Amino acid sequence: MMIIMHTDATPAQVQLVIERVEACGLKAHLSQGAERTVIGLLGNVRAVTPEQFEYLPGIDRVVPISRPYKIASREFIPENSVFPIDGQSMGGNEILIFAGPCAVESRTKLLEIAHAVREAGAHALRGGAFKPRTSPYAFQGMGEEGLQILAEARQVTGLPVITEVMAPEQVCLVAEYADILQIGARNMQNFALLHAAGESQHPVLLKRGMSATIEEMLMASEYILSHGNKRVILCERGIRTFETATRNTTDINAIPVLKSQTHLPVILDPSHSTGHWQYVTPIARAAIAAGADGLIVEVHQNPEEALSDGGQSLKPERFAELVRQVKLIAEAMGRRVAPVRAEQAAAQGQA
Ligand code: PEP
Ligand code: MN
Protein backbone atom coordinates (compact mmCIF):
# COMPACT_ATOMS: atom_id res chain seq x y z
CA MET A 1 0.00 0.00 0.00
CA MET A 2 1.20 3.53 -0.63
CA ILE A 3 -0.03 6.91 0.48
CA ILE A 4 0.19 9.67 -2.11
CA MET A 5 0.31 13.12 -0.55
CA HIS A 6 -1.29 16.24 -2.04
CA THR A 7 1.22 18.35 -3.97
CA ASP A 8 0.78 21.11 -1.36
CA ALA A 9 1.04 18.84 1.70
CA THR A 10 3.21 20.34 4.44
CA PRO A 11 6.23 18.59 6.03
CA ALA A 12 4.23 18.37 9.27
CA GLN A 13 1.42 16.52 7.48
CA VAL A 14 3.93 14.10 5.94
CA GLN A 15 5.47 13.54 9.37
CA LEU A 16 2.05 12.83 10.91
CA VAL A 17 1.34 10.16 8.30
CA ILE A 18 4.73 8.54 8.93
CA GLU A 19 4.02 8.45 12.67
CA ARG A 20 0.59 6.85 12.09
CA VAL A 21 2.13 4.22 9.81
CA GLU A 22 4.80 3.39 12.36
CA ALA A 23 2.23 3.26 15.15
CA CYS A 24 0.58 0.41 13.19
CA GLY A 25 3.85 -1.58 13.43
CA LEU A 26 4.79 -0.90 9.82
CA LYS A 27 7.83 0.74 8.24
CA ALA A 28 7.21 3.98 6.32
CA HIS A 29 9.34 4.49 3.22
CA LEU A 30 9.39 8.12 2.16
CA SER A 31 9.94 8.91 -1.50
CA GLN A 32 10.04 12.58 -2.44
CA GLY A 33 9.98 12.86 -6.23
CA ALA A 34 9.90 16.06 -8.25
CA GLU A 35 6.14 15.67 -8.79
CA ARG A 36 4.84 14.00 -5.66
CA THR A 37 5.58 12.72 -2.19
CA VAL A 38 4.76 9.08 -1.63
CA ILE A 39 4.90 7.10 1.61
CA GLY A 40 5.21 3.37 1.09
CA LEU A 41 3.94 1.01 3.78
CA LEU A 42 6.30 -1.92 4.32
CA GLY A 43 5.63 -4.94 6.48
CA ASN A 44 2.42 -6.82 7.09
CA VAL A 45 0.12 -4.39 5.25
CA ARG A 46 -2.75 -6.87 5.44
CA ALA A 47 -3.14 -5.77 9.04
CA VAL A 48 -4.25 -2.27 8.00
CA THR A 49 -6.91 -0.75 5.75
CA PRO A 50 -6.80 2.39 3.57
CA GLU A 51 -9.58 3.89 5.72
CA GLN A 52 -7.19 4.07 8.67
CA PHE A 53 -5.20 6.76 6.85
CA GLU A 54 -7.50 8.40 4.33
CA TYR A 55 -8.90 10.96 6.74
CA LEU A 56 -5.45 12.37 7.67
CA PRO A 57 -4.74 15.91 6.40
CA GLY A 58 -2.59 16.31 3.28
CA ILE A 59 -3.38 12.89 1.82
CA ASP A 60 -4.48 12.74 -1.82
CA ARG A 61 -5.19 8.99 -1.98
CA VAL A 62 -4.22 5.58 -0.64
CA VAL A 63 -3.53 2.96 -3.30
CA PRO A 64 -2.47 -0.67 -3.15
CA ILE A 65 0.83 -1.83 -4.69
CA SER A 66 -0.08 -4.93 -6.63
CA ARG A 67 3.45 -6.39 -6.80
CA PRO A 68 5.12 -8.34 -3.99
CA TYR A 69 8.18 -6.08 -4.32
CA LYS A 70 7.38 -2.54 -3.25
CA ILE A 71 10.30 -0.07 -3.29
CA ALA A 72 11.58 -1.63 -6.51
CA SER A 73 8.25 -1.22 -8.30
CA ARG A 74 7.38 1.43 -10.84
CA GLU A 75 3.99 1.76 -9.18
CA PHE A 76 5.79 3.13 -6.15
CA ILE A 77 8.49 5.16 -7.95
CA PRO A 78 7.38 5.94 -11.53
CA GLU A 79 10.52 7.84 -12.66
CA ASN A 80 13.73 6.01 -13.60
CA SER A 81 16.26 5.86 -10.79
CA VAL A 82 19.29 7.81 -11.93
CA PHE A 83 22.36 7.93 -9.69
CA PRO A 84 26.02 8.86 -9.95
CA ILE A 85 28.83 6.37 -10.22
CA ASP A 86 32.09 8.22 -9.76
CA GLY A 87 30.75 11.29 -11.54
CA GLN A 88 29.04 9.32 -14.33
CA SER A 89 25.30 8.94 -14.47
CA MET A 90 23.68 5.47 -14.29
CA GLY A 91 20.08 4.88 -15.35
CA GLY A 92 19.53 8.06 -17.36
CA ASN A 93 19.76 8.58 -21.09
CA GLU A 94 23.45 7.67 -21.17
CA ILE A 95 24.69 4.11 -21.45
CA LEU A 96 27.63 2.91 -19.31
CA ILE A 97 29.95 0.04 -20.21
CA PHE A 98 31.90 -1.91 -17.58
CA ALA A 99 34.73 -4.09 -18.85
CA GLY A 100 37.74 -6.11 -17.73
CA PRO A 101 38.84 -9.65 -17.06
CA CYS A 102 36.73 -12.28 -15.35
CA ALA A 103 39.36 -12.46 -12.61
CA VAL A 104 42.32 -10.40 -11.45
CA GLU A 105 45.23 -12.71 -12.34
CA SER A 106 48.29 -10.54 -11.65
CA ARG A 107 49.22 -6.90 -11.17
CA THR A 108 50.96 -6.61 -14.56
CA LYS A 109 48.11 -8.21 -16.49
CA LEU A 110 45.41 -6.21 -14.73
CA LEU A 111 47.13 -2.84 -15.22
CA GLU A 112 47.63 -3.64 -18.90
CA ILE A 113 43.99 -4.62 -19.47
CA ALA A 114 42.73 -1.66 -17.42
CA HIS A 115 44.54 0.75 -19.75
CA ALA A 116 43.29 -1.18 -22.78
CA VAL A 117 39.60 -1.10 -21.77
CA ARG A 118 39.85 2.56 -20.86
CA GLU A 119 41.30 3.36 -24.29
CA ALA A 120 38.51 1.35 -25.91
CA GLY A 121 35.84 3.38 -24.11
CA ALA A 122 34.95 1.56 -20.87
CA HIS A 123 33.43 3.58 -18.01
CA ALA A 124 34.42 1.19 -15.22
CA LEU A 125 36.85 -1.68 -14.71
CA ARG A 126 35.52 -5.11 -13.75
CA GLY A 127 37.61 -7.93 -12.29
CA GLY A 128 36.92 -10.63 -9.72
CA ALA A 129 39.14 -10.96 -6.67
CA PHE A 130 36.84 -13.49 -4.96
CA LYS A 131 35.64 -15.95 -7.60
CA PRO A 132 32.61 -18.24 -7.21
CA ARG A 133 33.87 -21.27 -9.15
CA THR A 134 31.89 -24.43 -9.79
CA SER A 135 34.94 -26.54 -8.93
CA PRO A 136 36.74 -26.11 -5.61
CA TYR A 137 39.95 -27.02 -7.48
CA ALA A 138 39.63 -24.14 -9.98
CA PHE A 139 41.34 -20.75 -9.47
CA GLN A 140 39.45 -19.04 -6.65
CA GLY A 141 40.79 -15.52 -7.19
CA MET A 142 43.54 -13.50 -5.55
CA GLY A 143 41.43 -12.33 -2.61
CA GLU A 144 42.50 -9.12 -0.86
CA GLU A 145 45.66 -8.88 -2.95
CA GLY A 146 43.39 -8.78 -6.01
CA LEU A 147 41.42 -5.93 -4.43
CA GLN A 148 44.64 -3.99 -3.85
CA ILE A 149 45.58 -4.44 -7.50
CA LEU A 150 42.14 -3.21 -8.58
CA ALA A 151 42.55 -0.13 -6.39
CA GLU A 152 45.91 0.57 -7.98
CA ALA A 153 44.36 0.20 -11.45
CA ARG A 154 41.71 2.71 -10.43
CA GLN A 155 44.38 5.13 -9.31
CA VAL A 156 46.37 4.96 -12.52
CA THR A 157 43.45 4.85 -15.00
CA GLY A 158 40.82 6.87 -13.16
CA LEU A 159 38.28 4.11 -13.84
CA PRO A 160 35.92 3.17 -11.01
CA VAL A 161 36.11 -0.49 -10.05
CA ILE A 162 33.43 -3.17 -9.83
CA THR A 163 34.15 -6.48 -8.15
CA GLU A 164 32.25 -9.36 -6.63
CA VAL A 165 31.51 -9.81 -2.94
CA MET A 166 30.60 -13.36 -1.98
CA ALA A 167 29.79 -13.21 1.73
CA PRO A 168 28.21 -10.70 4.15
CA GLU A 169 31.39 -10.49 6.22
CA GLN A 170 33.34 -9.47 3.08
CA VAL A 171 31.19 -6.40 2.31
CA CYS A 172 33.24 -3.92 4.38
CA LEU A 173 36.54 -5.19 3.02
CA VAL A 174 35.42 -5.11 -0.63
CA ALA A 175 33.81 -1.69 -0.15
CA GLU A 176 37.17 -0.32 1.04
CA TYR A 177 38.63 -0.96 -2.41
CA ALA A 178 35.72 -1.04 -4.88
CA ASP A 179 33.29 1.56 -6.20
CA ILE A 180 30.52 -0.91 -7.07
CA LEU A 181 29.75 -4.18 -5.25
CA GLN A 182 28.82 -7.07 -7.51
CA ILE A 183 26.52 -9.79 -6.21
CA GLY A 184 26.89 -12.79 -8.48
CA ALA A 185 24.24 -15.05 -9.97
CA ARG A 186 25.01 -17.82 -7.48
CA ASN A 187 24.39 -15.44 -4.59
CA MET A 188 21.28 -13.66 -5.85
CA GLN A 189 19.26 -15.16 -3.02
CA ASN A 190 21.96 -15.06 -0.35
CA PHE A 191 19.71 -13.01 1.90
CA ALA A 192 22.36 -12.28 4.52
CA LEU A 193 24.58 -10.89 1.76
CA LEU A 194 21.72 -8.82 0.30
CA HIS A 195 21.04 -7.44 3.79
CA ALA A 196 24.70 -6.48 4.28
CA ALA A 197 24.89 -4.88 0.81
CA GLY A 198 21.72 -2.96 1.65
CA GLU A 199 23.49 -1.40 4.61
CA SER A 200 26.45 -0.35 2.46
CA GLN A 201 26.64 3.07 0.82
CA HIS A 202 28.08 1.58 -2.38
CA PRO A 203 26.07 0.98 -5.56
CA VAL A 204 25.28 -2.72 -5.95
CA LEU A 205 25.19 -4.65 -9.21
CA LEU A 206 22.77 -7.53 -8.63
CA LYS A 207 23.06 -10.36 -11.15
CA ARG A 208 20.11 -12.56 -11.95
CA GLY A 209 20.36 -16.10 -10.62
CA MET A 210 20.67 -18.60 -13.44
CA SER A 211 17.37 -20.23 -12.46
CA ALA A 212 15.64 -17.20 -10.99
CA THR A 213 12.47 -15.64 -12.34
CA ILE A 214 12.29 -11.93 -12.98
CA GLU A 215 10.03 -11.57 -9.95
CA GLU A 216 12.52 -13.41 -7.73
CA MET A 217 15.24 -11.06 -8.94
CA LEU A 218 13.12 -8.05 -8.08
CA MET A 219 12.38 -9.52 -4.65
CA ALA A 220 16.16 -9.91 -4.15
CA SER A 221 16.63 -6.24 -5.07
CA GLU A 222 13.91 -5.38 -2.54
CA TYR A 223 16.11 -6.85 0.22
CA ILE A 224 18.87 -4.36 -0.67
CA LEU A 225 16.49 -1.43 -1.11
CA SER A 226 14.57 -2.12 2.09
CA HIS A 227 17.82 -1.95 4.08
CA GLY A 228 18.40 1.58 2.86
CA ASN A 229 20.58 1.31 -0.24
CA LYS A 230 18.82 2.91 -3.21
CA ARG A 231 21.61 2.40 -5.71
CA VAL A 232 20.85 -1.01 -7.18
CA ILE A 233 21.66 -1.97 -10.78
CA LEU A 234 20.00 -5.11 -12.12
CA CYS A 235 21.99 -7.35 -14.44
CA GLU A 236 20.56 -9.98 -16.78
CA ARG A 237 23.32 -12.57 -17.32
CA GLY A 238 21.51 -15.44 -19.00
CA ILE A 239 19.41 -18.25 -17.62
CA ARG A 240 19.53 -22.05 -17.79
CA THR A 241 17.41 -23.56 -20.56
CA PHE A 242 17.49 -26.83 -22.51
CA GLU A 243 19.78 -25.15 -25.10
CA THR A 244 23.40 -26.29 -25.01
CA ALA A 245 24.85 -24.30 -27.95
CA THR A 246 25.51 -21.43 -25.59
CA ARG A 247 26.55 -21.41 -21.92
CA ASN A 248 23.28 -19.76 -20.90
CA THR A 249 20.32 -18.33 -22.81
CA THR A 250 20.20 -14.55 -22.93
CA ASP A 251 16.76 -13.55 -21.74
CA ILE A 252 16.45 -10.43 -23.87
CA ASN A 253 12.79 -10.29 -22.83
CA ALA A 254 13.94 -9.54 -19.30
CA ILE A 255 15.21 -6.12 -20.35
CA PRO A 256 11.90 -4.55 -21.44
CA VAL A 257 10.02 -6.53 -18.76
CA LEU A 258 12.29 -5.19 -16.01
CA LYS A 259 12.22 -1.67 -17.45
CA SER A 260 8.43 -1.72 -17.33
CA GLN A 261 8.18 -3.14 -13.79
CA THR A 262 10.96 -1.31 -12.02
CA HIS A 263 12.61 2.11 -12.02
CA LEU A 264 16.04 0.56 -11.35
CA PRO A 265 18.72 0.62 -14.08
CA VAL A 266 19.06 -2.62 -16.05
CA ILE A 267 22.22 -3.83 -17.75
CA LEU A 268 23.22 -6.98 -19.64
CA ASP A 269 26.25 -9.26 -19.33
CA PRO A 270 26.61 -10.75 -22.84
CA SER A 271 29.77 -12.65 -21.80
CA HIS A 272 28.14 -15.00 -19.28
CA SER A 273 24.81 -15.03 -21.11
CA THR A 274 26.42 -16.51 -24.26
CA GLY A 275 29.67 -18.09 -23.05
CA HIS A 276 31.38 -17.63 -26.45
CA TRP A 277 33.25 -14.50 -27.50
CA GLN A 278 31.83 -14.69 -31.03
CA TYR A 279 28.30 -14.03 -29.75
CA VAL A 280 29.16 -11.30 -27.25
CA THR A 281 29.03 -8.30 -29.60
CA PRO A 282 25.79 -9.29 -31.41
CA ILE A 283 24.03 -9.82 -28.06
CA ALA A 284 25.47 -6.57 -26.68
CA ARG A 285 23.90 -4.79 -29.66
CA ALA A 286 20.58 -6.55 -29.03
CA ALA A 287 20.62 -5.50 -25.37
CA ILE A 288 21.00 -1.83 -26.19
CA ALA A 289 18.30 -2.11 -28.84
CA ALA A 290 16.03 -3.70 -26.21
CA GLY A 291 16.53 -0.78 -23.83
CA ALA A 292 19.41 -1.78 -21.54
CA ASP A 293 21.13 1.02 -19.63
CA GLY A 294 24.55 -0.56 -19.87
CA LEU A 295 26.73 -3.62 -20.37
CA ILE A 296 29.32 -5.58 -18.40
CA VAL A 297 31.79 -7.34 -20.67
CA GLU A 298 34.73 -9.68 -20.05
CA VAL A 299 37.93 -8.60 -21.81
CA HIS A 300 41.32 -10.32 -21.64
CA GLN A 301 44.58 -9.58 -23.47
CA ASN A 302 45.22 -13.27 -24.01
CA PRO A 303 41.96 -15.22 -23.63
CA GLU A 304 43.59 -18.58 -24.45
CA GLU A 305 45.58 -18.30 -21.23
CA ALA A 306 42.91 -16.79 -18.98
CA LEU A 307 42.50 -18.48 -15.60
CA SER A 308 38.71 -18.25 -15.92
CA ASP A 309 36.16 -17.61 -18.68
CA GLY A 310 38.71 -17.16 -21.48
CA GLY A 311 36.36 -18.59 -24.11
CA GLN A 312 33.87 -15.79 -23.56
CA SER A 313 36.42 -12.99 -23.20
CA LEU A 314 36.97 -10.44 -25.96
CA LYS A 315 40.44 -9.27 -26.94
CA PRO A 316 40.81 -5.50 -26.42
CA GLU A 317 40.52 -4.67 -30.14
CA ARG A 318 37.30 -6.67 -30.39
CA PHE A 319 35.98 -4.87 -27.34
CA ALA A 320 36.78 -1.53 -29.02
CA GLU A 321 34.70 -2.69 -31.99
CA LEU A 322 31.85 -3.65 -29.63
CA VAL A 323 31.89 -0.12 -28.20
CA ARG A 324 31.86 1.38 -31.70
CA GLN A 325 28.84 -0.71 -32.72
CA VAL A 326 26.98 -0.12 -29.46
CA LYS A 327 27.38 3.64 -29.95
CA LEU A 328 25.55 3.36 -33.28
CA ILE A 329 22.72 1.32 -31.79
CA ALA A 330 22.43 3.75 -28.87
CA GLU A 331 22.13 6.65 -31.28
CA ALA A 332 19.41 4.84 -33.23
CA MET A 333 17.54 4.48 -29.91
CA GLY A 334 17.80 8.21 -29.16
CA ARG A 335 20.41 7.59 -26.44
CA ARG A 336 24.17 7.80 -26.29
CA VAL A 337 27.05 5.94 -24.77
CA ALA A 338 28.36 8.23 -22.00
CA PRO A 339 31.48 10.09 -23.04
CA VAL A 340 34.61 8.87 -21.29
CA ARG A 341 36.73 11.36 -19.36
CA ALA A 342 39.09 12.16 -22.28
CA GLU A 343 36.06 12.89 -24.50
CA GLN A 344 34.49 15.05 -21.77
CA ALA A 345 37.70 17.05 -21.40
CA ALA A 346 37.96 17.48 -25.18
CA ALA A 347 34.33 18.64 -25.38
CA GLN A 348 34.91 21.13 -22.54
CA GLY A 349 38.04 22.38 -24.29
CA GLN A 350 36.02 23.07 -27.41
CA ALA A 351 33.23 24.85 -25.54
C1 PEP B 1 31.41 -12.97 -13.22
O1 PEP B 1 30.93 -11.84 -13.46
O2 PEP B 1 32.58 -13.30 -13.48
C2 PEP B 1 30.48 -14.02 -12.72
C3 PEP B 1 30.92 -15.02 -11.98
O3 PEP B 1 29.22 -13.80 -13.11
P1 PEP B 1 27.87 -14.60 -12.73
O4 PEP B 1 27.68 -14.39 -11.28
O5 PEP B 1 26.83 -13.89 -13.58
O6 PEP B 1 28.05 -16.03 -13.13
MN1 MN C 1 33.36 -14.66 -15.46
Image (cartoon, rainbow, N blue to C red):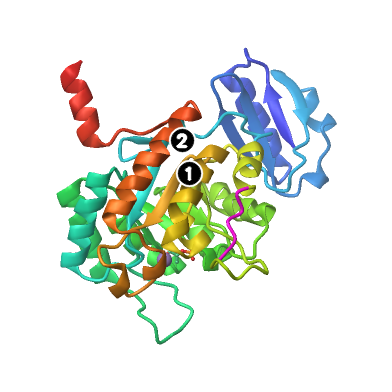
Start-end of magenta stretch: 248-252
Q: Is residue 179 visible?
A: no
Quadrant where the N terminus sits is top right
Q: Position of residue 206 (x, y in %)?
A: 51, 55
- Left or right: 227, with 336 as reference point: right
- Left or right: 23, with 35 as reference point: right
Q: Is residue 124 above or below residue 164?
A: above
Q: Position of residue 310 (x, y in %)?
A: 36, 69
Residue type (three-letter) at the residue carrying disc 2: Ile
Label 1, on which residue? 285
**Residue at disc 1, secondary structure:** helix
- Residue drawn at point x = 48 percent, y = 44 percent: 285
Instruction: Out of 108 and 13, give the one closest to the viewer.
Output: 108
* Cβ–Cβ under 8 Å for marks 1 and 2: yes
Q: Label 1 crowding class (10 Å Cα cut-off): few <14, some 14-19, many 20+?
A: many
Instruction: Out of 25 and 268, give the one closest to the viewer.
Output: 268
Residue 329's disc is 2
Q: Is residue 226 above or below residue 344?
A: below
**Residue at disc 2, secondary structure:** helix
- Residue that sits furthest to the bottom in the current view: 137
1 or 2: tag closer to the N-terminus: 1
Residue 121 position by quadrant? top left
Q: Is residue 319 visible?
A: yes
What is the CA distance from the residue labelled 1 to the residue labelled 2?
7 Å
